Image (spheres, helix red, strand yellow):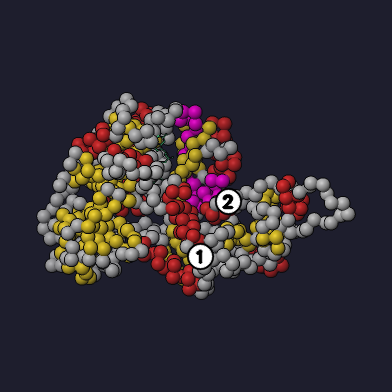
Amino acid sequence: MNIRNIAIIAHVDHGKTTLVDKILHSTNIFRDNQETGELIMDNNDLERERGITIFSKNVSVIYKDIKINVIDTPGHSDFGGEVERVLKMADGVLLLVDAFEGPMPQTRFVLQKALHLGLHPIVVINKVDKANCRPDEVHDAVFELFFNLDATEEQLNFPTIYGSSKNGWMNTSLEETDNIFPLLDAILEHVPEPTVNEGPTQMQITSLDYSSFLGRIAVGKVARGTVREGQQIALVQAGGEVKRMKVKELYTFEALGKKKAAEVSAGDICAIVGLDEFNIGNTICDIEFPEALPVISVDEPTMSMMFSINNSPFFGREGKFVTSRHLRDRLMKETEKNLALRVEDSDSADSFLVYGRGILHLGILIETMRREGFELTVGNPQVLVKEIDGKKCEPYENLVVDVPAEFSGKVIDLVTQRKGEMLIMESKGEMQHLEFDIPSRGLIGLRSNMLTNTAGEAVMAHRFTDYRPWKGNIPGRSNGVLLSKNTERTTGYSIDKLQDRGRFFVDPGEEVYVGQIIAEHIKPGDLNVNATEPKKLTNHRASGSDDASRAAPKILMTLEECMEYIQQDECIEVTPKSIRMRKVILDENERSRVSKQMKSEPA
Ligand SMILES: Nc1nc2c(ncn2[C@@H]2O[C@H](COP(=O)(O)OP(=O)(O)OP(=O)(O)O)[C@@H](O)[C@H]2O)c(=O)[nH]1
Ligand SMILES: [Mg+2]
């Protein structure tokens, strides 16, 4: 059968998954009466809740008797390495660009990777249904981006499709249609058929699937010859070592699922079950001809966090898995499927240093663990510092902010305070478009500050660029926190009295402990407060004055917001039911003793 292999790439939220959904729907893979909710592709719980794609996924459809393997990729920059790898399975890409936003940092990154691999993208200007969208300007901006990324003459000559994945139409012009067939036709026309090399089996493992029943599943495109069920193969590993193994089961991708196959030929994408020890980048070869394909580099972590057992006074109340043994086993198991993750033992048996690609990458791991019943403590995220040519260097990122013009001054102030330097300022519709260079450190905690200062209007995106010399001290959180003096339930009475001192993270009646962060202080500096005082009894029963109802509702923070909020001497207690921020040292006296000691020691 004739095959096309395409990957859909774009900046976060530009509509990749929505488009894949529409492709699936319009090729009739569903029974007519089958109920399909929105975005069947984002099928993992966390993906659904957050509305983002975390794992790339393979599906396939048949259009005009041709099988199109479609790879949906994540757009968030923390998962950029994944995109780079799965591009190895594709012979063409759809580069989606939002018709209002235009090219964003991740657009640049994924396009660059595709161009380097020699792929010829089809550009899809999506979301042309949006009010104020600027499809023509965006098209020019995309052309400029191709040009700046050194696209070849042929790559610059890209076909463009316009449309709205949400409304289910695509066309070669801006004229609205009622289907996406013009896009599918463009795929058949412009994406080359995979090259079919005859000869001994060769297939590089470029992606990994995981099933609790089958274990790790190797995914890749067959590059040469065929892979057969039951075949004895040679697996060539990174260092060149060769291991003999057997293909237990073999699958191809069909519609949303996988279909068992006896044999898969060069050009098609397949999944192999039964290889016990393998890594991304390994090559599966004919047992007589162990020739490896070039190694794929797996992205280096850029951020680390300390994961420890929960040692708060509320330890063990809510979780099933609480020991360091549980924690260690779980983290090690994660490294088998989470490729960009690294785990190291620390000097303490109860703590592990976990390295990842960013706040979201690590946040998702923590969230997954707490849903599985784990309790743990995590420290504040640290960027990875490297020594390059004898100089201390740190990661830098390209930061893009789109904001209504009236707020642009505020945004520039905020970013400059954090050692960002402005590169570009231009208007984009009614918005101001700003680009900065900024150390990754400066980005931690920036988002919430930015939103508060721009009435929630700022849209920001950032992407790692390179390592550069250390930029010096970056101010941390400007406000202090209110810490509980007692381990007890808070009262509406106390919280009400403390309202003008801080904005609370806990509700009246919530149990808190000594050293827990219960509010943000309105000023710099931390304050230990009593939030658990019962109301003084008077002779008169106060008529209808319920103090609890006067307290402003607590500020709800997500795990990732907490991760960006806490400072060096603070950490987060995570359990299946709660997320509490606290001081690492809970006791007030002990804490001030240690901090004095730190100050007296020369830095
Ligand atoms: N107005 C409009 N909204 C769209 C269109 N396509 C997608 N969206 C919306 O944009 C949001 C993001 O869509 P997704 O398909 O999840 O985007 P994605 O590119 O897969 O995002 P990531 O996987 O997180 O990178 C959703 O709220 C969609 O409903 C479109 O054509 N027009
Ligand atoms: Mg998606």
Residue 118 shows up from this direction: no
Near mark 1 (Cα within 10 A), the count class, few <14, some 14-19 or many ≥20, is many
Residue 357 or residue 550, whichever sits in front: 550
Question: Element type at marker 2?
Answer: loop
The residue lying at 70 percent from left, 50 percent from top is: 502
Over which residues does the magenta segment extend?
427-448
What percent of the width, then of the height, locates residue 485?
Answer: 72, 62
Task: Give the percent coordinates (x, y) of residue 372.
Answer: 47, 62
48 relative to 5 in the view: left or right: right
> Which residue is pictured at 32% across the width and 35% down the height?
124
Q: Amino acid at mark 1?
A: Phe
Q: Which numbered circle lies on residue 374?
A: 1
Q: Residue 495, percent across and down?
A: 73, 52
Residue 448 visible from this viewpoint: yes
Q: Residue at x 57, y 62 (%)?
A: 573
Circle nearer the viewer, 2 or 1 = 1
Q: Is residue 572 above or below residue 189?
A: below
Residue 433 located within the stretch drawn in magenta: yes
- Dot 1 falls on a residue whose secondary structure is loop
Q: Amino acid at mark 2?
A: Met
Name the residue located 30 percent from the left edge and 49 percent from the top edge. 256
Front residue of this view, candidates 427 and 162: 162
**Residue under numbered circle 2:** 557
Q: Quadrant of residue 509?
A: bottom right
Distance from disc 2 to disc 1, alpha carbons, whole Å, reads: 20 Å
The answer to whether 19 is drawn above or below residue 465 in the figure is above
Q: Farthest residue toward the left?
A: 198
Q: Indicate which disc residue 275 carries.
A: none
Position of residue 2 measured from the top left corner of the image (x, y, whole percent): 16, 45
Please check the rendered image and state whether residue 191 is part of the magenta-colored stretch, yes or no: no
| Residue lying at the far right of the rendered structure | 539
